Amino acid sequence: MSFKFIDLFAGIGGFHAAISGLGGKCVAAVEIDKAAAAVYERNWGLSALGDITEFANDEGVSLPTHDLLAAGFPCQPFSKSGAQRGMDETRGTLYFNILQIIEAKRPALVLLENVRNLAGPRHVHEWEIIIQTLREQGYKVSDTPTIFSPHLLPRSLGGRPQVRERVFIVAARKDGASPEELILDGPLVLNKPVENWDPLNWNLDKDLPLTNTSIVPGCELSDAEMHWLNAWNDFVVGMWELREGSRLPGFPLWGDDWRPESDLDAVIDSSTPKWKADFLVKNARFYEEHRAFIDEWVKKWDFYSDKFPPSRRKLEWQAQDAPSLWDTVMQLRPSGIRAKRPTHVPALVAITQTSILGSRKRRLSPIEAARLQGLPEWFNFGDQPASVTYKQLGNGVSVGAIWHVLKAAAVAFEPELKKSAPKMLKAIQGAPPSPDDALSDAH
């Protein structure tokens, strides 16, 4: 055993996959969701503890000593009224419990993961408090967010064809350091393709790979969904011919707003947001240019009937020169049907909107979704419903992204880790380039 780690807000074990592949031994996992904890134990042989507040609270911390703390923690807002109060301000949030563990156990390395918006303009205060409190505990960390997505990595480095931007906060303990010495310059990794990799070179069939069948139980499209997509496919194919191979426009096509431009005064006034007025004008001009085709298509498919809910009368075309809808990857979103090139897929989410594979005329399967997160082929969800599996994967972390960030941490924090956790540093430095190499025979 080279080093010990704890896995907080562990889910089904994405962190565990990466860190154990690097040589770590998990000495405690914490996950409150019972279904996720059951999957975790099934695959990693470790029973996850429940509510973190029972093991880290004002009475103390009852978790074992460890070298690395990993946590995909929920981002609860901190009160702005308590600005500059540091650790006290985090009380009432689950981040406070993480800080208690850090203070009590002093791990050599802290790895936190969260949604992209944590580093956005709406959460500047929360970000500053997190960085401030880590430095108050004597940890070296960057002010600049580390943001990364697995689709920016080639397959040879553990990448996957999924756009999944996440924020990673990595901090290393630096005993006896001055405040200036606790500032790491720049992010650990850049939010751009690695080693000249072009994400447009992803191929779902080859790189995931997709299950080679159009029938996967639980992934079928309903009759209503097939009707919507067949209708829009007819539209896309017809437009491709009408426009002589010219791609559809990039702005959203709003079927409910196809009208002559002369009729726009009835729907645009001084209260209409500029962005919406712009789309209304563009849709009117698009309608006028293709009015004969659109009117015939609308009648053919009974487009304005109850067969098409309002959200299914909208198409967001992001598939460039794809000649048909069935040559794309789709999502049925509240904002409309979004079609993208079949290179990489949008981020898995913990709710609906599971990607539809046009080439298979079905949704992405749970096995394919697990592959997108970088979980090994032997990973087993048991007999739980597919909806539960999708939720767990949507809440999970990318194994390849974690691997890439920890490899970078071993470089950025080498002086600190040489003193505080030399075995962990050696294990990370000596690990193969991809987690796939470490996990393929690990079970």
Image (cartoon, helix red, strand yellow):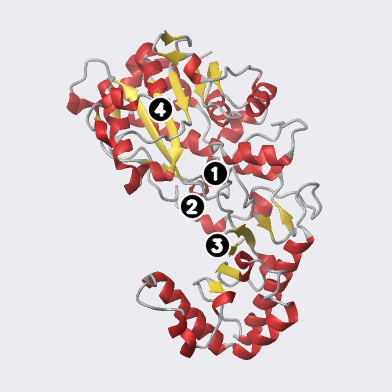
The type of residue carrying mark 1 is Gly
Figure check: 356 above or below 78 = below
Assess whether mark 1 and mark 2 are in contact (beta carbons under 8 angstroms).
Answer: yes
Q: Quadrant of residue 166?
A: top left
Figure check: 54 above or below 353 = above
Which residue is pictured at 70% across the width and 35% down the height?
377
Q: Position of residue 210 (x, y in %)?
A: 71, 50
Q: Which callout, 1 or 3, points to the residue nearer the camera? A: 3
For residue 93, which numbered disc appears in the image?
Answer: 4
Residue matched to label 2: 197
Helix, strand or loop under label 4: loop
Helix, strand or loop under label 2: loop
The type of residue carrying mark 4 is Thr
The type of residue carrying mark 2 is Trp
Which residue is pictured at 59% across the width and 69% down the height?
315
Mark 4 Cα shell of 10 Å, populated few (<14), some (14-19), many (≥20): some
Which residue is pictured at 57% across the width and 17% down the height?
49
User: In which quadrant will I find the C terminus?
Assistant: top right
